[in-house]
């Protein structure tokens, strides 16, 4: 039996001014099957976060951390909230490192090679590696040394508008799960899910475009990667029509652009 590669999505919340282990606030990974791991760093330098307005406003609300304010509404105190439902996820970095090694080494569903993904993920990979002091000699072999940036994939496909995250943005676990949604969307755009017989046309290659609301106007967005067969283009258009927010998708003859091979209404109204 040929095993499918495991796609793992990584996200971290961190203090951008602290590149050490104490700068990590939380870390999450999830794979394409939904197996996930989420932890909050007990060694995080909480006091330094009082000087990070963005983190206070957008990251800490999802965490078992309590911030106190003075009469001028200035943050003056910070501490762990041990009554919070996620307090059990506050773990020492050594424990987090061991748990992540187990996550990568023993997936619940047997897979082939592990491919790591993140969105604008250079810092995320660094924070993961810092759990072993950034020393690859100490880091278990199962921990990926490199990753593929979802933003780079998007740019290679024409940098399309991406699905928006509907809730809990800057919560590491929610963000990692949304990265999985982004990758599924990008895989659809790339036409990797094409199935059925390949029908090669003498007219040349094929394009796919999709129509979705964009602010006050509705815009067509074209998948920049051309398709060699009409079947691949139609299959990609069908997948796009099923994506949230897409009103219509079309497979087109690339040479004429106006020759529509298949016009598919979206499932979202």
Image: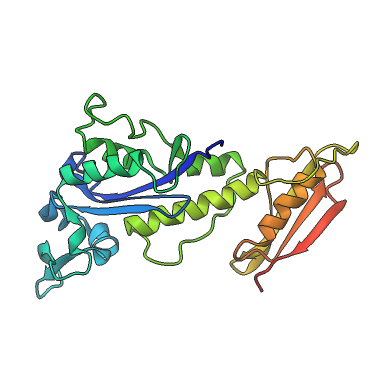
Q: Residue furthest top?
A: 137
* Residue 105, position as x, y percentages in the image: 34, 38
Q: How many marks overall?
A: 0
**Where on the picture, by quarter, is residue 18?**
top left
Q: Is residue 11 left or right of residue 65?
A: right
State whether residue 113 is above or below residue 35. Answer: above
* Residue 100, position as x, y percentages in the image: 28, 43
State whether residue 265 is above or below residue 121. Answer: below
Question: Quick check: can you spot residue 212?
Answer: yes
Residue at image position (56%, 36%) is 2
Q: Residue furthest right?
A: 202
State whether residue 266 is above or below residue 262. Answer: below
Residue at image position (15%, 72%) is 73
Which scheme is used to colour this image of the protein? rainbow
Residue at image position (13%, 73%) is 72
Q: Quadrant of the C terminus?
A: bottom right
Of the pair 212 and 186, the residue shown nearer to us: 186
**Where on the picture, by quarter, is residue 16?**
top left
Q: Is residue 180 left or right of residue 229?
A: left
Q: Is residue 134 left or right of residue 80?
A: right
Of the pair 54 and 202, the residue shown nearer to us: 202
Q: Is residue 202 left or right of residue 79?
A: right
Residue at image position (80%, 43%) is 197
* Residue 90, position as x, y percentages in the image: 17, 56
Question: Quick check: can you spot residue 220?
Answer: no
* Residue 62, position as x, y percentages in the image: 27, 65
Q: Quadrant of the N terminus?
A: top right
């Amino acid at each position: 039996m040929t095993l499918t590669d495991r796609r793992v999505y990584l996200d971290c919340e961190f203090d951008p001014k602290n590149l050490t282990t104490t700068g990590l606030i939380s870390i999450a990974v999830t794979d394409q099957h939904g197996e996930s791991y989420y932890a909050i760093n007990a060694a995080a330098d909480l006091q330094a976060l009082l000087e990070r307005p963005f983190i206070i406003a957008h990251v800490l609300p999802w965490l078992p951390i309590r911030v106190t304010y003075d009469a001028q509404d200035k943050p003056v105190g910070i501490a762990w909230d041990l009554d919070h439902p996620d307090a059990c996820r506050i773990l020492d970095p050594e424990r987090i490192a061991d748990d992540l090694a187990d996550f990568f080494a023993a997936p619940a569903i047997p897979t082939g090679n592990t491919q790591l993904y993140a969105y604008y993920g250079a810092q995320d990979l660094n924070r993961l590696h810092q759990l072993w002091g950034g020393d690859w000699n100490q880091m278990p072999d199962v921990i990926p040394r490199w990753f593929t940036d979802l933003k780079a994939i998007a740019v290679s496909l024409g940098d399309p508008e991406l699905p928006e995250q509907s809730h809990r943005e800057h919560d590491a676990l929610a963000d990692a799960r949304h990265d999985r949604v982004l990758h599924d969307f990008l895989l659809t755009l790339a036409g990797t899910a094409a199935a059925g017989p390949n029908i090669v046309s003498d007219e040349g290659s094929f394009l796919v475009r999709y129509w979705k609301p964009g602010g006050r106007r509705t815009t067509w967005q074209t998948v920049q990667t051309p398709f060699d067969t009409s079947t691949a283009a139609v299959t990609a258009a069908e997948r796009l029509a099923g994506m949230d927010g897409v009103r219509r998708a079309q497979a087109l003859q690339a040479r004429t652009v106006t020759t529509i091979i298949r016009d598919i209404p979206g499932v979202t109204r």
